[in-house]
Amino acid sequence: MKPSRVHLSDILLTALAPITWGTTYAVATEFLPPHHPLLVAALRSLPIGILLTLGLGQLPQGIWWWRILLLGSLNIGIFQALLFVAAYRLPGGVAATAGAIQPLLVVLFSWAILKEKPSKFAILAAIAGFIGVGLLVLAPKAKLDGVGVMAAILGAATMGLGTVLVKRWKRPVPLLVFTAWQLTVGGLVLLPIALVTEGSLPPLSTPNLLGFVYLGVVGTGLAYALWFRGIDRLKASAVSYLGLMSPVVATLIGFVFLHQTFTPTQLFGIAIVLMSVLIGQQTNR
């Protein structure tokens, strides 16, 4: 069967998801309550998921109940929990570097599940992207917390597997419905565990509320819809390379808003990451 044509607009729209996720580190540390990573992750996904599901008025049928339970857990629940654990326990650079292994994992998952044998350039591009992110955001004296590093790597693996399974199974409903199901399931999986292990949140300030609204509507609802749309239209491995844009954006936020400066090493890292992303898009052809 002849492959569908890939449009630049599909790549750019998909890239908006990791670009948005690049703001998560700053929002989590500057606006959200500390010491509640699981509860924060649940409240990021569950309210917007329930609102969309109720508004769209459609529920899974048949085999899609367990598929959505698995996809929602991998792409939302488990991934978000591990992301916030890493964000709270590690400097943003260390968390981003560990998470940058995701393109390589997606290449391997695609090979095993989708039977898409990767080219040598695809593997080299994934490794180069990991190195580039490390040069960009990993400080020489960064604190390496073992639990945080493991959380970041496992988070990359869970979402990588979820990305490939979304491509494998093909959504049976419109994009927003599919997104809403996963957001709701992911939040429901996380919420009881969070309440038991962390307790309830303290009284929320106005910045806390604004942080939750931004992450829920823009950083979760909109971003995941664009991500799943991209999985529909691009190869899973090509989508995963776009995820490398997230640490680039996180670094740029530090430069623009926190008056941080770029070193030559960081600029070299940005160049490597962008080259990896460009090479990764060639897998669509």
Image (cartoon, rainbow, N blue to C red):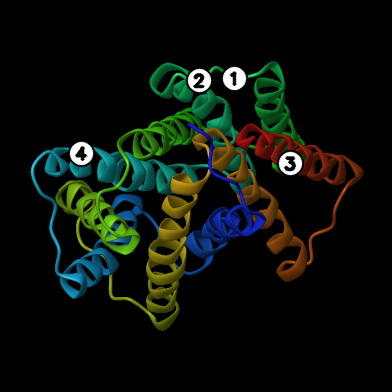
Tag 3 secondary structure? helix
Q: How far, Cα to Cα, is label 2 from label 1?
A: 8 Å
Which amino acid type is shown beneath numbered disc 3?
Answer: Leu
Q: How far, Cα to Cα, is label 4 from label 1?
A: 26 Å
Q: Which sits earlier in the primary sequence, circle 3 or circle 1?
A: 1
> Which residue appears farthest toward the bottom when viewing the image?
206
Q: How far, Cα to Cα, is label 4 from label 3?
A: 32 Å
Q: Residue at x 85, y 53 (%)?
A: 262
Point out residue 180 in the picture as x, y percentages from the top left corner.
27, 60
Q: How far, Cα to Cα, is label 3 from label 1?
A: 16 Å
How dense is the environment of label 3, judged by Cα within 10 Å: few (below 14), some, or many (20 and up)?
some
Which amino acid type is shown beneath numbered disc 2?
Answer: Leu
- Mark 3 vs 2: CB contact within 8 A: no
Tag 2 secondary structure? helix
- Mark 2 vs 1: CB contact within 8 A: yes
Q: Residue at x 22, y 57 (%)?
A: 184
Residue at the disc numbered 3? 278
Residue at the disc numbered 4? 67
